[in-house]
Every structure is written in structure tokens, then in C-alpha cells.
Amino acid sequence: PIPQPGQPPPRFLINGKEFDPHAPPRKLKLEAVEEWHVSSRDLDHPFHIHVNPFMFKRADGRVVWKDTLNLAPLQSMTLRTRYQRYVGVFMVHCHILVHADLGMAETMEIVAPRLAHDHVDDPPEPHH
């Protein structure tokens, strides 16, 4: 949506929060398998994850692996991902870059279990 003159720009959120480049990344354990529930409220949002693809079941029942999935308005999907071979920081974001620039992004960090210090954040449930 385009804001009216004098109105603030729209906010785009993941998990109810705008992207904060100074926030510590969400920590995830290497080799962990997680299920994410992603949804869109009122606009199309192509959900994109860097580094790790995710698996989901299409409407025809076929299971596919992707790194980007378009979420139509009011659509929800369940994704599964496994963090393999990569340790470090990556992003998830809306692939409409204006939406990402207006807050629809989050940084995550995959850590080796020995570096997790027995504290890893709860699995993310990105909501567009």
C-alpha cells in the first residue's frame, strides 16, 4: 500500500517485529530440523530464506524443496527445514525488497551444538 501524504509508511513485520539490524540473531542448532508456520495477512509476500532450502507440500500433494515461496493474502503454509553444513548468520525476508526495507526481515544464526551453550531460541514462526 502507498501511504497518503503526511502519513507514515506501512510497517512490515516478522513475528510481530520490524527488522532491527542491532538485534542479536535468533540462534538455531546445526543439524536441527524445524517446522515453521508462515502466513500473510493482506498482501502477497514471497518468503525467502538464505542458505537453507525448506520443504513443503504443494496443493497437489507433491513435496518440493525451495528457498522462496509466495504467500498470497490470508495464506498459511507449514515449512520444514534442516540446518546442515553451514554455521553462521543468514537472513529470512520478504523477497519484495521494499517490504524487507520496511521491516520484513530477520537475521538468524546457525551454531554448532557445542557453541549453543545449551540455549537456543524457540523455533521461529515467521508471519508476513
Image: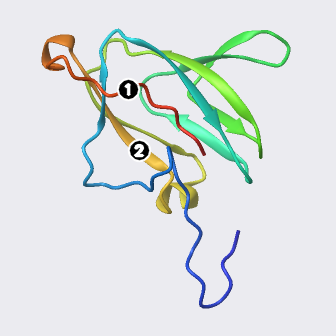
> Observer-nearest residue: 99 or 8?
8
Asked if residue 83 is positioned above or below residue 105 in the image, the reply reads above
Residue 24 % position (x, y): 24, 43
Seen at 55% across and 37% down, the residue is 48
**Residue at figure coordinates x 50%, y 44% from the top left:** 15
The secondary structure type at the circle numbered 2 is strand
User: Which residue of the protein is positioned furthest toward the right in this rendering?
Assistant: 60
Indicate the amino acid at tag 2: Glu
Q: Which residue is most to the bottom?
A: 6
| Snapshot colouring | rainbow
Few, some or many residues within 10 Å of mark 2 (<14, 14–19, 20+): many
In the visual, does 93 lie left or right of 65? left
- Badge 1: residue crowd in 10 Å (few <14, some 14–19, many ≥20): few
- Quarter of the picture containing the N terminus is bottom right
Quadrant of the image occupied by residue 108 = top left
Q: CA distance from mark 1 to mark 2?
A: 14 Å
Q: Which mark is residue 106?
A: 2
Mark sitting on residue 122: 1
Left or right: 114 as drawn, with respect to 28: left
Q: Is residue 117 above or below residue 106?
A: above
Helix, strand or loop status at disc 1: loop
Pinpoint residue 47: horizontal percent, then vertical percent. 59, 39
The x and y percentages for residue 50 are 44, 32
Q: Where 64 falls versus 128 (above or below)?
A: above
At x 68% / y 84%, what residue is drawn?
A: 4
Q: Earlier in the sequence, mark 1 or mark 2?
A: 2
Instruction: Identify the amino acid type marked 1.
Output: Asp
- Viewer-closest of 7 and 66: 7
Image depth: mark 1 or mark 2 in front:
1
